[in-house]
Amino acid sequence: MAIVGYLIVSTTADLLISPFTDKQTGYVFAVSCFALLATFLFLACFGMTKERVGEDEDEAPAPTLREMLRAVTGNTPLLNLSLFTVFFYIAYTVWMAIAIYFIKYIIGSEGYTATFFLIQSAAYIVGTVISEKVIALMGKKRMTLIALGIGILGVMMQYFVAGNNLWLIMTGVCLYSITLGMGFVAMWSMIADTVEYAEWHHGVRSEGAIYGFFNFITKIAMAIGGGCAGWMLDYYHYDAGNITASAINGINILMTLFPGAMFALSAIFVACYSLDEKTYRDIVHKISLRKQNAL
């Protein structure tokens, strides 16, 4: 459903803005429409949700603060996954922030915005949908490394080969977007495995602390990515009233080589992630045996 929402926003925003001669007013109108729709859907979700979780008489006592900190700081797979997430989210956030500039100044057609994001969203959905089958075939870690390789190939081709060829540009965009879809699926499935790793090594199940830490990391990474987009545009002397060759080159780099570099850094930490499927199954089995012996 999140993908559907992204698709709706990315393909209809330009339609809501274009009737206004003053673009600033158009943006305010479009954002207001989306905000009202989001508020309505949020309230509807809240009103229609019913809790079905009952009390568990055998529930373990809540972990202490020290135990939760140890489950996070002593969790090497979680730390490697978090660093992968930081660079992956920076690549994603910068790319999304720069895309509208890329369409306007590199592709040279603001009217292509809806089509651009429609194609990009379709590729993202493909990456998301095929992830389950690919994970079953080769595992999360290997799939993620291959996906990152595909993304790097796509952005490198887009920068060095595509030139002004729209078909090649969109091929690069699609390869990048497939990587996004596969990367996000792998990321959020891998975080669950780190809960059992912490339970085995520290004797306490602290999924709340682990998920809370990981969510915090994603927010920090998106904030850094948003800042990087603005800082890099300034570095390349972007000025809407006076577009220079330096600014054009900077926009192109931020859409291609920059996310490619972030994907490469991400791959380093994925390679260091030690929880493959066999290791994870062994840990779950050991936890089960330990619980049986404790009875």
Image (cartoon, rainbow, N blue to C red):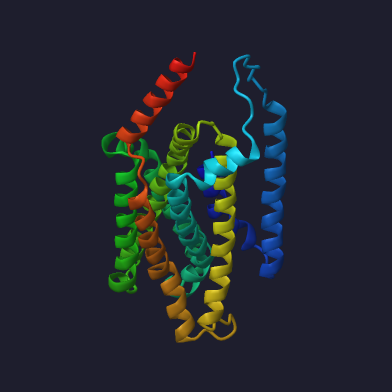
Give 114 or 168, whichever is nearer the viewer.
168
Pinpoint residue 145: horizontal percent, then vertical percent.
Answer: 31, 51
Q: Residue at x 67, y 38 (%)?
A: 41
Q: Is residue 200 visible?
A: yes
Number of numbered discs present?
A: 0
Q: Residue at x 48, y 17 (%)?
A: 294
Q: Is residue 121 visible?
A: no
Q: Residue at x 32, y 70 (%)?
A: 165
Pinpoint residue 82: horizontal percent, then vertical percent.
Answer: 48, 51
Q: Is residue 139 above or below residue 29?
A: above
Give 213 or 14, whichever is nearer the viewer.
213
Give 128 or 59, whichever is nearer the viewer.
59
Q: Is residue 140 left or right of residue 222?
A: left
Specify the quadrant of the image occupied by residue 16: bottom right
Q: Is residue 272 left or right of residue 10?
A: left
Pinpoint residue 21: horizontal percent, then vertical percent.
Answer: 67, 70
Q: Is residue 273 left or right of residue 201?
A: left
Pinpoint residue 102: horizontal percent, then vertical percent.
Answer: 47, 70
Q: Residue at x 27, y 39 (%)?
A: 138
Q: Is residue 67 above or below residue 221?
A: above
